[in-house]
Image (tube, rainbow, N blue to C red):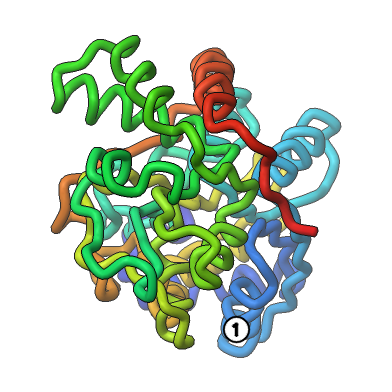
Amino acid sequence: MYEQIEGLSFEDREAKLLALAKKEGGEISFYAGTKPEDTDPIIDAFQEKYDIKVENYRAAGEVIAQKVLQEVQAKHDGADLYVADASQATVLANLDALAPLKTPLTEHLVSGSATDYSAAIYVIAPVISWNTNLVKDPPTSLEDVFERFRGKFMIETEDAPWFEALVKEYFVKEKGMTEDEAIAYWEDNIQGAFVVKGHTLMTTLLASGQAEVCIACYYHAVSSAKADGAPVDAMPIVEPVPYTFISAGIPVTVQHPATALLMLDFLLTDGQEIFVGQDRNPSNVDYQGTFKLDEYTNVPYALSGDEDEFAKWSKIYDGVLEKAGGEVIEED
């Protein structure tokens, strides 16, 4: 199929993909792990622009990746295009579950956010944030949080890759600690912290004042809550900024390949404007919002999909969280 669009200008490529998509039936199966309020504007805009019907399956990113893999292994029709975190794309590609992905738009993406089989649609950046009613002198570093907000900050239960990146890239490379020293430092300073399951819940708890500081709330969620009047902020940004990607890929069992490419290109252009409106951080450098990742010292995480490393650091992270004491806070 790529030979039919090779060498075309972007406008001619779009027109050709649309014509091919109509021949494929004018429909697409789209798996996306984001909330309806985030996904629906994308789907509605795509359907309105191209008059193509989108069948949307919603689930968490890991569930989507498992479903895609099961469909591929069974050679069963399923997703034409899926969206999940970047590490899932690496796992699927290593298992030969993804088709090669070629779009000229990858040249416009944040460095490191595109592979031969996937392309990031936006950046996820967990940042240090605070309740502005309770914190008048915001933290300036992670160490500052540990020193001044001991027992008053939140940390999330499933953030082992984020933790691994901070240990290796910040505390070891920048601060000169060994890994064991860095882990012990966390264990000493996490005592009394609020351990929370879910980034959305952490933002809600921060806004309600149940904790003074969140050390890994998503920037786009904090920014959105602030715009809605919540007493929260993440500016000035505390460095380093850990980040990962939400990526899109095309399974090898794709039934509507031209439609999948058309929607992918849409996600990387028109969709980027929608992400800006949702206070997300677009992957396309031509559509950046108020928060520009390359302006800050940053630390990538959860990109490799190495299952052994993930298991190792999940165990270490769980051990660190146990030092906090208390029960995990979850949605009722």
In this view of the protein, which residue sits in the foreground, 86 or 329? 329
The quadrant holding residue 49 is: bottom right
On the rendered image, what quadrant is the C terminus found in? bottom right
Residue located 20% across and 65% down the image: 236
Disc tally is 1
Question: Which residue type does callout 1 highlight?
Answer: Tyr
Residue located 26% across and 69% down the image: 136
In this view of the protein, which residue sits in the foreground, 100 or 286? 286
Residue located 49% across and 58% down the image: 211
Q: Is residue 332 visible?
A: yes
Kindly identify which residue carries mark 1: 50
- Return the x and y of residue 113 as percentages of the image width and height: 35, 46
Residue located 63% across and 53% down the image: 82
Residue 150's place in the image compared with 108, above or below, is above
In this view of the protein, which residue sits in the foreground, 79 or 103? 79
- Return the x and y of residue 265 as percentages of the image width and height: 46, 66
- Return the x and y of residue 220 as percentages of the image width and height: 42, 67
Residue 300 shown left or right of residue 249 in the figure? left
Q: Secondary structure at mark 1?
A: helix
Residue 47's place in the image compared with 33, above or below, is below
Residue 194's place in the image compared with 303, above or below, is below
**Classed neighbour count for the residue bearing mark 1: other residues with Cα under 10 Å, few (<14), some (14–19), many (≥20):** some
Residue 37 shown left or right of residue 188 in the figure? right
In this view of the protein, which residue sits in the foreground, 147 or 204? 147
Residue 157 shown left or right of residue 24 in the figure? left
Q: Is residue 307 visible?
A: no
- Return the x and y of residue 250 as percentages of the image width and height: 60, 48
